[in-house]
């Protein structure tokens, strides 16, 4: 009986697994979440185990999300940075174009006036 291995079409999605079928980035983010969450749990468990677990979850969630979340090739922190940059931009964008033909006409008029002022005076002196 033949065994088949599924290969993704996009080879950029393949990441080298480090430990527990997680990448190095995911292991690091989970470790940071663990280091943040455990002290929060021990500090808040005196109010009840449930409260301690909930606070630990809220404290460790950002680090864990940074390790797991990936959308359109952007990690969580890059996605948040792009979102903040987007929100800081002005909401209305105006389209401004340059009329090339108008600029050419202005340049022709400037050249005509320059020629009239310089060339016309010189030509009048030569005629006299």
Image: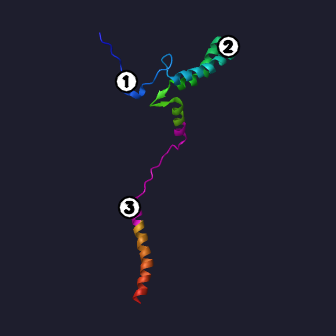
- How packed mark 2 is, by other alpha carbons closer than 10 Å (few <14, some 14-19, many 20 or more), is some
For residue 90, above or below residue 29: below
**Image-based side of 118 in relation to 38, left or right:** left
Label 3 sits on a secondary structure element that is helix
Which of pointers 1 and 3 lies earlier in the amino acid sequence? Answer: 1
Q: Position of residue 31 (x, y in %)?
A: 58, 20
- How packed mark 3 is, by other alpha carbons closer than 10 Å (few <14, some 14-19, many 20 or more), is few
Residue at the extreme top of the image, as rendered: 1
- Residue tagged by mark 1? 8
Q: Can residue 97 be found in the magenta stretch?
A: yes
Q: Residue 101 carries which label?
A: 3
- How packed mark 1 is, by other alpha carbons closer than 10 Å (few <14, some 14-19, many 20 or more), is few
Q: Which mark is residue 37?
A: none
Q: Position of residue 9 (x, y in %)?
A: 35, 26
Disc 2 to disc 1, how far (Cα)?
A: 45 Å
- Quadrant of the image containing the C terminus: bottom left
Which of pointers 3 and 2 lies earlier in the amino acid sequence? Answer: 2
Q: Which residue occupies 42% across, 71% down?
A: 111
Marks 1 and 3: which is nearer the front? Answer: 1
Q: Position of residue 60 (x, y in %)?
A: 59, 21
Specify start and end residues of the magenta stretch as a single range: 84-105
Q: Do the residues labelled 2 and 1 touch (CB within 8 Å)?
A: no
Q: Quadrant of residue 99?
A: bottom left
Q: Which residue occupies 60% across, 22% down?
A: 32
Label 1 sits on a secondary structure element that is loop
18 or 13: which is nearer to us? 18
């Amino acid at each position: 009986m033949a065994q088949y291995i599924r290969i993704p079409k996009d080879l950029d999605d393949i990441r080298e697994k480090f430990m527990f079928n997680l990448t190095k980035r995911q292991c690091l983010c989970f470790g940071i979440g663990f280091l943040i969450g455990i002290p929060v749990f021990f500090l808040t468990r005196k109010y009840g185990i449930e409260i301690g677990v909930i606070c630990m979850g809220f404290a460790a969630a950002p680090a864990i999300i940074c390790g797991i979340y990936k959308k359109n090739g952007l990690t969580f922190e890059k996605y948040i940075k792009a979102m903040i940059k987007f929100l800081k931009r002005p909401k209305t964008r105006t389209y401004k174009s340059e009329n090339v033909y108008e600029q050419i006409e202005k340049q022709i008029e400037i050249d005509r006036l320059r020629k009239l002022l310089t060339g016309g005076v010189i030509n009048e002196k030569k005629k006299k």
